[in-house]
Amino acid sequence: MTIGFWGIHAGAVAGLLALGWSWTGFALALVLYVPRMFFVTGVYHRYFAHRSYKTSRWFQFLLALGAETTSQKGVLWWAAHHRVHHKLSDAPGDLHSVRQSGFWWAHMGWILTNGLEDTDQARIKDFARYPELQWLNKYWYLPVVAIAAVSFAVGGWFGLVWGFCVSQVLCWHGTFTINSLSHIWGGRRYATDDDSRNNPVLAIVTMGEGWHNNHHHYQVSARQGFYWWEIDVTYYVLRGLAAVGLVWDLHGVPEHIRSNAADLAVDDDARVSDVVLDAA
């Protein structure tokens, strides 16, 4: 993971120096960034980590396959680690906390260290029972190699640099801002006992994940932008998938959950949400 991580960063930098700036290339990077960011937010996070909606077994596999093109390891690994984060948010034992381990560890150190390579099967028993997901979890790098190969086959070095390397670097660091920046930058509507923040800038960058204080307040919701003006593109995509029957039972936000900010904001030590998906 570490060699691949820095290798792709080096490829992006070297490729840009060799090819020069290109608006067409930047557009290509964004075109591939958007669906892969959705796979992070809507699949790794809202589906596998929090089970905020339901789907069929075959579509579950396709979602997992798409998620692993983002090079953030296996779906079982990702979700198991994220469930620890919510169980111990910003407390000792949180695997990616700015408060506990510093900014850079929270941003990306946790996904690169050898000490956290194993998948805690006990925390992901609800999905660990599927052999196809276990296979994907073990060979998570194959979809990454495939997307790189397709980028090169279609666009040559230009496609590999912009469509894969640059897009991948943007996807990584866009995702990682939620572990790092979203716990130090933004406003707090709800008095969760962690440092989560709502940040509209990060919500745009991450297709809705920037409403992080909302999410820590009520973690099972498929919708992280609780109000209509809180842009949450991932939720809009999920609504579209639900409209054609590919997913269903999207968890919403009950009004009493959404509207209790005024009562709780006075107590920053209050425990707001106990909806932690530990293990089914």
Image (cartoon, rainbow, N blue to C red):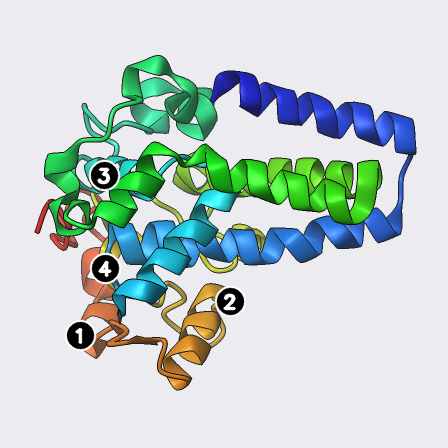
Q: Is residue 192 left or right of residue 247?
A: left
Residue 94, given in percent of the width and then of the height, sits at 24, 29
Judged from the image, the secondary structure of the residue bearing numbered disc 4 is: loop
Q: Is residue 72 left or right of residue 160?
A: left
Judged from the image, the secondary structure of the residue bearing numbered disc 2 is: helix
First-in-chain label (2 vs 1):
2
Mark 1 residue type: His
Question: Which of the pair 7/97 is nearer the observer?
Answer: 7
| CB atoms of marks 4 and 1 within 8 Å | no
How far apart are the two marked residues, 3 and 1, measured between alpha carbons? 29 Å
How far apart are the two marked residues, 4 and 2, measured between alpha carbons? 18 Å
Q: Is residue 218 left or right of residue 215?
A: left
Taking 167 as reference, is 60 above or below it?
A: below
Residue at left 20%, top 75%? 254
Q: Quadrant of residue 128?
A: top left
> Which residue bears the numbered disc 2?
233
First-in-chain label (3 vs 2):
3
> Which residue bears the numbered disc 1?
256
First-in-chain label (4 vs 1):
4
Mark 4 residue type: Arg
Which numbered tag is attached to residue 51? Answer: 4
Mark 3 residue type: Ala
Mark 2 residue type: Val
Of the two numbered discs 3 and 1 in the rendering, the one whose residue sits closer to the viewer: 3
First-in-chain label (4 vs 3):
4
Residue at left 68%, top 35%? 165
> Which residue bears the numbered disc 3?
80
How far apart are the two marked residues, 4 and 1, measured between alpha carbons? 21 Å
Question: Which of the pair 148/7 is nearer the observer?
Answer: 148
First-in-chain label (3 vs 1):
3
